[in-house]
Amino acid sequence: MFANIGPWQLLIILVIVLAIFGTKRLRSLGSDLGSAVKGFRSAMNEAEETKEQIGDSSQDADFDNTPAEEPRKEKDA
């Protein structure tokens, strides 16, 4: 679909986009997009670190001695 787009066509598209949006809006849009990508990457790295910390150290619960199985102490009245 986009295989036939050459450098001149891309230049014309860039000029049209600059004329419509202006340089300030494109600059702010680029910085917003960059900060969003940076935040996403840091969140992914944080999730990986948390996953590694939790991964091996977690153990299953021990249900061998539950309160229902313990003998009840009867009160002397």
Image (spheres, rainbow, N blue to C red):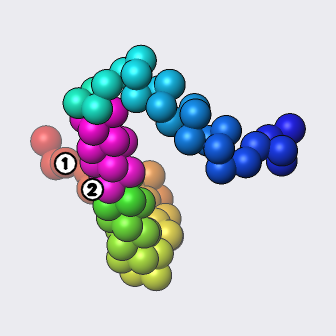
The residue to which callout 1 is attached is 75
The kind of residue tagged 2 is Lys
In the drawing, does residue 3 fall left or right of residue 43? right
Q: Is residue 53 above or below residue 40?
A: below
The residue to which callout 2 is attached is 73
Label 1 Cα crowd, 10 Å radius (few <14 / some 14-19 / many 20+): few
Q: Report the front residue among 13 and 55.
A: 13
Please count the marks in the image.
2
Q: Is residue 33 magenta?
A: yes
SS class of the residue under badge 1? loop
Q: Quadrant of residue 11?
A: top right
Q: Quadrant of residue 45?
A: bottom left
The kind of residue tagged 1 is Lys
Residue pushed farthest front? Answer: 8
Residue pushed farthest left? Answer: 77
In the drawing, does residue 40 fall left or right of residue 9? left
Q: Residue at x 83, y 47 (%)?
A: 3
Q: Residue at x 67, y 38 (%)?
A: 9
Q: Main secondary structure of the magenta part?
A: helix
Do the CB atoms of the residues marked 2 and 1 lie less than 8 Å apart? yes
CA distance for labels 2 and 1 = 6 Å
In the drawing, does residue 19 fall left or right of residue 6? left
Where does the N terminus fall, quadrant-wise? Answer: top right
SS class of the residue under badge 2? loop
- Looking at the rendering, the stretch of residues picked out in magenta corresponds to 26-39
Q: Report the front residue among 56 and 51.
A: 51
Q: Residue 62: x and y, percent? A: 46, 69
Judge whether residue 49 can be spotted in this image: yes
Where does the C terminus fall, quadrant-wise? Answer: top left
Q: Quadrant of residue 53?
A: bottom left
Label 2 Cα crowd, 10 Å radius (few <14 / some 14-19 / many 20+): few
